[in-house]
Image (spheres, rainbow, N blue to C red):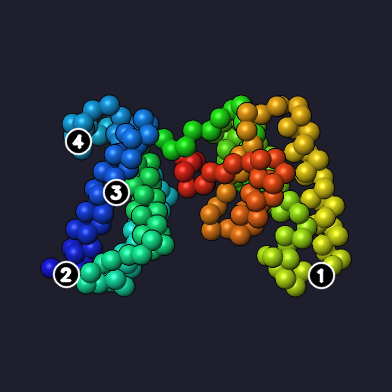
Amino acid sequence: MNRIDDSKILIKKSVATISKLDEESSKLKNAKPHKIAESKNVTYKDAKSGNINVAEFKKAFYALIEADDYLYKKAPLHNLNDDEAKIFCKLILQTQKHLNNVLKEFGFEFEGGAQLDESALYIVSNKKLLKNLKNKMPNLNIISTEGVLEAEDMKVINPNMPEKALKGIEKKCGIIKEQINKLINKLNPSKVIVIMDENNKADELIYLRAKELYGAEKISIDDIDL
C-alpha cells in the first residue's frame, strides 16, 4: 500500500470517528448534529446537476494536506497530545465543512454552523469580515474595531511601536469604544459577542478587552458558515 492509499484510509477513519463523536456530543446537549438534512439513506445517486465550487474544494484539499502531516510526524502510533489533537481535529472538521459546501452545489442540504442572533451585538476586528457577515445577514448588529480596543495592547503585538503612533491609536480606540457604547445604549442587545480568529493575537486582545468592558462572549470564526 502506498502513502496516498494509506493517507486516504486513515483520513476516512478520522472523519468517521470525529463525526460520530460530534453527533453523540450534540445529542447530549439536545442539539442537532451536523449531518445531511433529513434522510439517513442519502447517496451519490441523489446528486443534482450543478457547478463544482472550486474555492471550497481547494480549501478542503489544503486542509487535508496539512492534516496529512500528522500521519507521518506521529507514525507509527499516531498518538496526539491535547494540543495536537485539537489542531488535527480542527483540520478534519474544516475539511468536512468545505466538502459540505461543495456538495451543496449538487442539491445536498446540511445543517449550518453557529447561528448568529439578530438580537445580539457582534464585534469583529476588520471590515472584510463585517461585510461578509452583513451580506449573509443584512439585519445583523455588527461593528468593526479595525484594530485593538486599547492602545497599550498594540505594545503586545508590536513592542517596538513608537509612542507617537500609539497616541493616534489611542484616539482611534476612544472613537470606536464610544461607537460601541452608543450601539449598546441604542440596541440594548441580548449580549455582546466577539467573533474571533483563535490564532490571531489581536483578536484575542480585542475579546479580552470587550469582555472586561461589555461582558462580551466569544465565538470562533471557524464555527460560522460564510
Q: Residue at (53%, 33%) from the top-left corner?
A: 116
Calculate the distance from the C-alpha at mark 4 to the C-alpha at mark 1.
60 Å
Which callout, 3 or 4, points at the residue further toward the start of the chain?
Answer: 3
- Which residue matches tag 2? 2
Q: Is residue 156 above or below residue 135?
A: below
Q: Amino acid at mark 2?
A: Asn
Q: Disc 1 or 2, which lies upstream in sequence? A: 2
Q: Alpha carbon of mark 3 to alpha carbon of mark 4: how far?
A: 20 Å
Pinpoint residue 198: horizontal percent, then vertical percent: 53, 54
Residue 59 drawn at (x, y percent): 40, 53
Residue wearing tag 4: 43
Q: Position of residue 113 (x, y in %)?
A: 43, 38
Q: What residue is drawn where x is 46% and y is 40%?
A: 225
Q: Which of pointers 1 and 3 indicates the residue nearer the eye?
A: 3
The kind of residue on which mark 1 rests is: Pro
Residue located 32% across and 34% down the image? 27
Q: Which residue is mark 1?
A: 162
Q: Tell me if label 1 and label 3 are in contact, CB under 8 Å.
A: no
Query: Left or right: 46 with respect to 126?
Result: left
